[in-house]
Image (cartoon, helix red, strand yellow):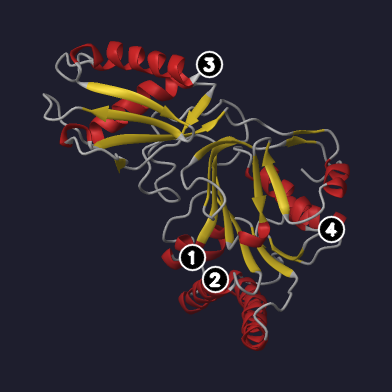
Amino acid sequence: MDKQSLESYLTQSLNMALASQIQGETSYTNSFNIKVEDEGFLFIPRLPAGYIVDSELYQQIFLIANASLYPIYTLLKQNSAYFIPLDTKDIHVQRAFFFPWKKGISKRLIIKDLDDFVQRNKGTRLPLMENLVLDYEKVTSIAIAGNSGSGKSYALTYFLSLLKPISELIIIDPKFDTPSRWARENQVPVIHPNPNRSKSDFVSEINETLSQGLNLILERQRLLYDNPQHPFTHLTFVIDEVLALSEGTNKAIKEAFFSLLSQIALLGRATKVHLLLVSQRFDYNSIPVSVREQLSVLIQVGNINHKTVQFLFPNLNPEGIVIPIGVGTGLIQVIDNEHPYQVLPLLCPTYSTKKGIL
């Protein structure tokens, strides 16, 4: 579909759906115009108008246009109205709503043999979907959230498999479950509970390991001071079910755990030390606010609604985002200089792995 046909189609869609909400003003009454560009489309209101040009109107247009454009384009959800100035001297049309999009829709990767896929996919670029690749060089920390049965462990195993060739891994598994079995198969160190030790003793051991990671960061910072281009190997602390570590733990030990997480999250990027955190939810009891603010890859799998997204995406209204139904589907946001800042629908890869891990 060419730009002119797309403009006509969008204009017709908005005329039919918006007319009752903006007091009958339409493109037929010269009240607004639609302009399609490469990166999205513009809704240009002619002011003064008999309707209010605000965030509510922006979200109404988003709902209509996102459904109308699916599956040719995916509109990128905004938290509020996205205004841009127009290059004209006519005050009546000097501003527009901008609706950025990406071509196509999210598509799931289908991987027949995960080990073979990892062997062929060498380097720090990690494929997450057919049209989404993550550069681990630009990642600070990753968070995966979702209820039981949503596909968190499945997504985590995929990340572990991709990260093993490019990063040293230290796995912390309070459930002694899937990550521990994966670590056993791949000869990766793992810290898990022992029936003869208390919960606080277990978290103290974790604190000691994180403290060693923090010391490594400080050591690497000194090397970077002398040589800003000094190469480092990646180190990733993988913590499954973070909430299980912070609840029911001695207050002093919990505070030390939170402090170490915060320092690693804040200082780790330049020295290539990362956190990969998994939890049912990321509220203030599971991780400190400072850690949540440093996350550069945020993934929510499972049921998506206002309640489930409130911790990872506190300002997001998920209404209107087209999310396919199924296990391992949800939302993803990648915060770097390569991807759109907005939240995208996610379909985690489908793959087969060694028997007895999942």
In the visual, does 76 lie left or right of 215? Answer: left
Residue at horizontal 50%, vertical 34%? 303
First of labels 1, 3 by sequence position: 3
Q: What residue is pinned by disc 1?
A: 291
Tag 3: amino acid? Met
First of labels 1, 2 by sequence position: 2
Residue at horizontal 71%, vertical 57%? 176
Q: Nearer the viewer, mark 3 or mark 2?
A: 3
Corner quadrant of residue 317: top left
In the visual, does 270 lie left or right of 194? Answer: left
Task: Find residue 336 and report its horizontal and vertical position in percent.
Answer: 54, 55
Q: What residue is pinned by disc 3?
A: 1
Tag 1: amino acid? Val
Query: 113 or 340, which is in the foreground?
Result: 340
Q: What residue is pinned by disc 2?
A: 261
Query: 131 or 256, which is in the foreground?
Result: 131
Q: What residue is pinned by disc 4?
A: 184
- What is the number of the mark on residue 309? none
Whether residue 309 is visible to the viewer of this picture, yes or no, is yes
Which quarter shows the C terminus?
top right
Q: Nearer the viewer, mark 1 or mark 3?
A: 3
Q: Separation of disc 2 and disc 4 at Cα?
A: 25 Å
First of labels 4, 3 by sequence position: 3
